[in-house]
Amino acid sequence: MSGDGRYSEVLAFPSRAELARRLPPLALGLVVLGTSVALSVRADLGVSPWDVLHQGIARATGLSLGTVVVLVGVAVLVAWIPLRQRAGIGTLLNTLSVGAVADLGLWLVPRPEPLAGRIALLVASVVGFGVGAGLYIGAGLGPGPRDGLMTAIAARGHRVWAVRTVMELSVLAVGFALGGTVGVGTVVIAFAIGPLTHLALRRFHLPVSDAAPDVLGE
């Protein structure tokens, strides 16, 4: 997301010491991301493009939003296979945990009636998306399914911004057709998450260059 290759390095075979250093920010980032999904839904002002898809599938199937997040993540991981995208411990944890945290957040957080309360939830979710992504990507233990698909396609000679735009417009269109919520929040999240993630990565990125034998650059 940052456009800086050092932020997409992956520690392929971390030592116990590295895991102890990197798992806490990874876990915190995934909790923040899942919570942000729930907050954006409860704000009811429009969700992120991918969550428009998740929400649309959930409404069409009767599954919980979190379950759909997990299932879509698994499906996207399958798409990694022909692209030979590298996974890591963080990839698996991301795939399985963000949806569960989102469902828990939806259970705990009610929808506020005043517009001011909904705007506050949207702002909190936008900041959370950036901080959460910065923490989990910065941990260097592997990209999430959707980020990994984007970077894998881009590695075939396409510009990252173009790949991301096509992907997000595509999932947005499908999700909207299925009944997902599109609104001002969708636009805010789409435009804000990149810069916020970049700032968070600068703060939370854990360099892996000092562990050269364990590093695989993406």
Image (tube, rainbow, N blue to C red):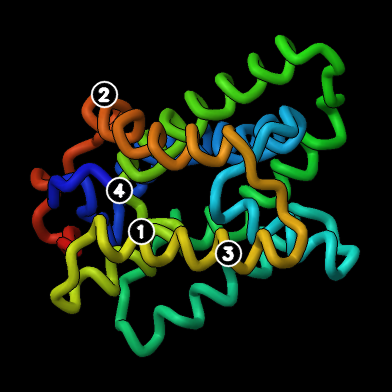
Q: Where is residue 145 in the image (x, y as percent from the top left)?
A: 47, 64
Callout 2, which amino acid?
A: Arg
Of residues 48 and 140, the one nearer the viewer is 48
Which residue is labeled 3 in the image? 173
Report the residue at 40% width, 79% height from top: 80
Q: Which mark is first along the chain, 3 or 4?
A: 4
Which residue is labeled 1 in the image? 165
Q: State yes or no: discs 2 and 4 in contact (Cβ < 8 Å).
A: no
User: Which is more foreground, mark 1 or mark 2?
Assistant: 1
Label 2 neighbour load within 10 Å: few <14, some 14-19, many 20+: few
Q: State yes or no: discs 3 and 2 in contact (Cβ < 8 Å).
A: no
Left or right of 57: which side holds 120?
left
Of residues 182 and 23, the one nearer the viewer is 182
Q: Element type at marker 2?
A: helix
Q: Which mark is first along the chain, 1 or 3?
A: 1
Report the residue at 30% width, 48% height from top: 140
Q: Where is residue 67 in the image (x, y as percent from the top left)?
A: 76, 60
Q: Element type at marker 4?
A: loop
Which residue is labeled 2 in the image? 203
Q: Position of residue 12 (x, y in %)?
A: 28, 62
Q: Element type at marker 3?
A: helix
Callout 4, which amino acid?
A: Gly
Left or right of 74: which side holds 102?
right
Report the residue at 64% width, 46% height from top: 182
Which residue is labeled 4 in the image? 140
Residue 215 in sight from this viewpoint: yes
Residue 24 in sight from this viewpoint: no
Q: Which mark is first along the chain, 2 or 1?
A: 1
Callout 3, which amino acid?
A: Ala
Tell me how far mark 2 sits from mark 4, CA to CA: 14 Å
